Image (cartoon, grey):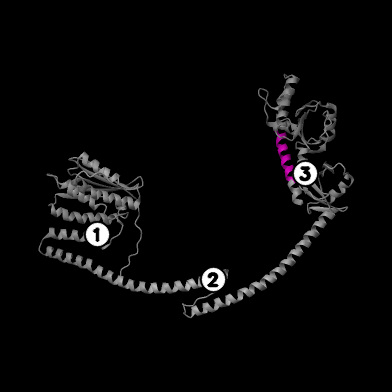
Amino acid sequence: MYRTTRSIGRNVEDLFNEMNENTKYLYTHQAEDYGYLYEILENKELSENKRSALVTDMLRDILYMNQHIEHVFFTLPDGRIYTAMRPPEAVTDTEKLLDWHRKNFGSDSKEIQILPSHLPDYYAGAKEQVFSVARNIMNTRTIQTADTEILGTLYIDISSSWLDGIIHETKLGQGSHIYLVDTKQKMFAYNPYKEEKYEENLGTYLELMTSDYQYIKAEGNYYIYSQIPNCSWLVLEKIPSFYLENSYRNIRNITLAVIGFGTFLLGVLYFLYSRKMNRPIRTLKEAMEQIQRGKLDTRVHIGSNDEIGFLANGLNSMTKKLQMHIRKVYVAEIKQREAEIEALKMQIQPHYLYNTLDVIRMTAITNDDAEAAEMLDGLSGQLKYLIGNVRDKVTLQAELDSVRNYFKIIRVRYENKMTLEIDVPENLLNLEVPQLILQPIVENSVKYGLRPKEEGNGVVAIQGEIREEFLELTIMDNGVGMSAEKLEYIQNLLEHSESDKKNSDMESSGIGLKNVCDRIKMIFGEEYRIEINSFENIGTIVKYRLPVVKEKEREEIHV
């Protein structure tokens, strides 16, 4: 019930805050060609009709800022009054309005004031009560006049139906009433119950209503109250004591009955549940003790579908899988030992081959055959790279070393007519690339570009750089190049999964490129690729577009 009064108080506070802002409208509004309110009132060249029209327009703007505003009027110190009201407009009794103004608003304060509900009989035919907010409007021409000179007093009359709606939408108990009380004037600010008149006791009640409590009890009633912030009003709810106390007794009796019945029911359920659970739990305990002794063929049979049955089925499944796992581990250990023996055998074969090649190379050096020794050294390096440590990715340094070993053989074979030039920054050498992506292209350059060249030295150049966050590798040669028809065929072969076969020469020269391109796309994705350009009798350029992948640390296990 206290929260109910707080909720009503917050609604009233929100409306008062809104009205507080509305009353400041006369300070900020500026009429076109005539300026602010103080300029309109002080302009002696304006006719009274024009001045009245301008001020009334301002008041009408305030009138329609909220649907619950019924009248707005502005009184000047000399007795002039400007009014605006919702249709149908009524005749204003100026003398009665001024008399009401002098009785209810005699303060020189610049702050907003809230006036209790009243019948606005200064309008002809007024039947519905309103409550008003009022503010003195100061002359803001200068700082001094803004503090001392009053232009007039603004009144906003708000329909009491707004309060009726808030109060009546609240579900009140039998005999309960809600009021708004002005603590400063010690009178009702709003009393929708005309039959109740006890203002003579209101002052006594208000003295007992302190901020330390939320209610008082007087004359057989509870008075629950809540102060509305930023004003002198409070929300007061009167509740007959018999209603509140009867409700409390009913709640207490029902609560005690529920607690008593619940305690009895829980006792019965606990007794039945413990009897039902005890036997299966003992069975599970005995089975687990058997399994701890190593009897994995132990099984538990409990004919229930509850949690104990679920645990029993889980225990049976666990022991069964444990037996199967032990058997699998035993077999796996045997197979692992066999695989280790085979791995040792396979490890011996490459070492034997490398040692044999080293013996042949040393024999060639002994016999002063440097070319044969260099070719054997290149072949040994290539074999170690190809079969010694097979993996998907290697460092760019390792891939370039493999190309160098290949060119050792090529230079001897073609009597140093072919040269390999590598221009790759040192900071790129530790980046990872797929294994064997450079050598097939270099072989193509030697076989189809440099070897058919009749005169001059052949050069294969490899360059590397980071461009647009990609690793770009370029292989160039100054060979015979290729025809436009053959270039178009190879470019189409790289772009599509299948291509028309022109002839065996085209197919054989493009298959290496195609395989490398497919591997790059399969490992890194479709955005990475190979591009080729060639100019007949000038040379060929192949560009790789790869991601920048730094070398990961790997732990090598030697058996």
Inter-mark Cα distance, 2 to 1: 55 Å
Of the residues shown, which amino acid type is indicated by label 3? His
Mark 1 or mark 3, whichever is nearer to me = 3
Residue 280 coordinates in the image, percent (x, y): 58, 75
Tell me whether the residue at label 2 lies in contact with that at label 1, contact meaning CB atoms closer than 8 angstroms. Answer: no
Q: Nearer the viewer, residue 427 or 391?
A: 391
Q: Nearer the viewer, residue 185 or 118?
A: 118
Of the residues shown, which amino acid type is indicated by label 1? Leu
Q: Which residue is mark 3?
A: 168
Snapshot quadrant of residue 44: top right
At horizontal 21% and vertical 47% (from top left) the residue drawn is 507
402 lies left or right of 2: left
Inter-mark Cα distance, 1 to 3: 91 Å
Mark 2 or mark 3, whichever is nearer to me = 2
366 lies left or right of 307: left
Q: Which residue is mark 2?
A: 311
